[in-house]
Amino acid sequence: MSTKSTDALSRLTNALKVLPNVGPKTAQRMAYELLQHKRAGAEELVAAIQAALLQVHHCRLCNTFCEGDLCDICADHERNPKRLMIVQMPVDVASMEAANCHDGLYFVLMGQVNPAQGADLQAIALEKLISRLQQYEIEEVIIATNFTAEGDATAYILSQLLQNFPAKVTRLARGMPLGGELEYVDAGTLAQAVYERRNIK
């Protein structure tokens, strides 16, 4: 194998390691699979990634991913604009919508506070959240971060920040499993946690 082709293979393997939970061995297997058996799929993957990088950005209001100025939920005039749920990732919005338990709008932090991994306040979109709260009349803010150590730390920071705003602040009920992530909680449990949310301010 030539040095040039080896460099290209190494570059592909290293690029695949950017994906979560993909280590060197897994990345190598994925690279071999794409090159040996899935070349057409690899070309489609490249095209899809390039299109997404060009077309997908953050919703002006809620910070989730979308292709327009506003996502479909923020553009829906039938939603309650005075009830705002704060979640960590776009997948959490999908989970809440599947549970059909929230008629308001969302704000997506796009991360969580995790000092152990160097993720401090810069890891979440606090400035954009503050701007949202300052510009729009919000009556209730629901903190819906995960019930993990990182999610609880993020919730604490948010609760302190929200002391400066007049909105009522609530947190999902502790019916959620300890260490639970919204993405993996069933719709019934998720809905119950929303309905039984507790005041923290």
Image (spheres, helix red, strand yellow):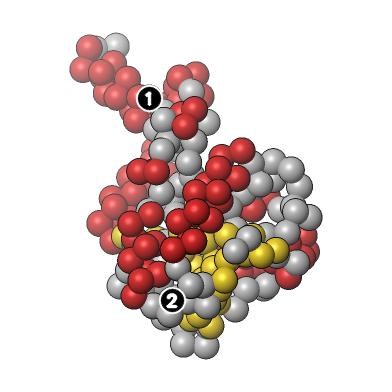
Give the residue at x 47% y 32%. 115
Give the residue at x 29% y 52%. 53
Residue 177: percent from the left, percent from the top? 76, 47
Residue on which the image places disc 1: 13
Residue 26: percent from the left, percent from the top? 51, 24
Which of the two residues, 127 or 176, is positioned nearer the viewer here? 127
Residue 37: percent from the left, percent from the top? 47, 33
Number of labels in the image equals 2
Mark 1 or mark 2: whose residue is earlier in sequence = 1
Q: Residues within 10 Å of mark 2 (few under 14, many from 20)?
A: many
**Picture layout, residue 160 above or below residue 72:** above
Residue on which the image places disc 2: 74
**Picture layout, residue 88 above or below residue 15:** below
Query: Given the image, on which type of amino acid does mark 2 rest?
Result: Cys
Callout 1: SS: helix
Give the residue at x 44% y 63%. 164
Callout 2: SS: loop
Q: Residues within 10 Å of mark 1 (few under 14, many from 20)?
A: many
Query: How far apart are labels 1 and 2 at the CA level?
Result: 38 Å
**Picture layout, residue 161 above or below residue 112:** below
Give the residue at x 49% y 61%. 163
Which of the two residues, 67 or 104, is positioned nearer the viewer here? 104
Left or right: where 177 falls relative to 164:
right
Query: Given the image, on which type of amino acid does mark 1 rest?
Result: Thr
Which of the 4 image quadrants contains residue 201?
A: bottom right
* Residue most extreme to the left: 4
In the rendered image, the quadrant that contains the N terminus is top left
The reply to whether residue 154 is in sight is yes
**Could you say which disc has been placed on residue 50 in the image?**
none
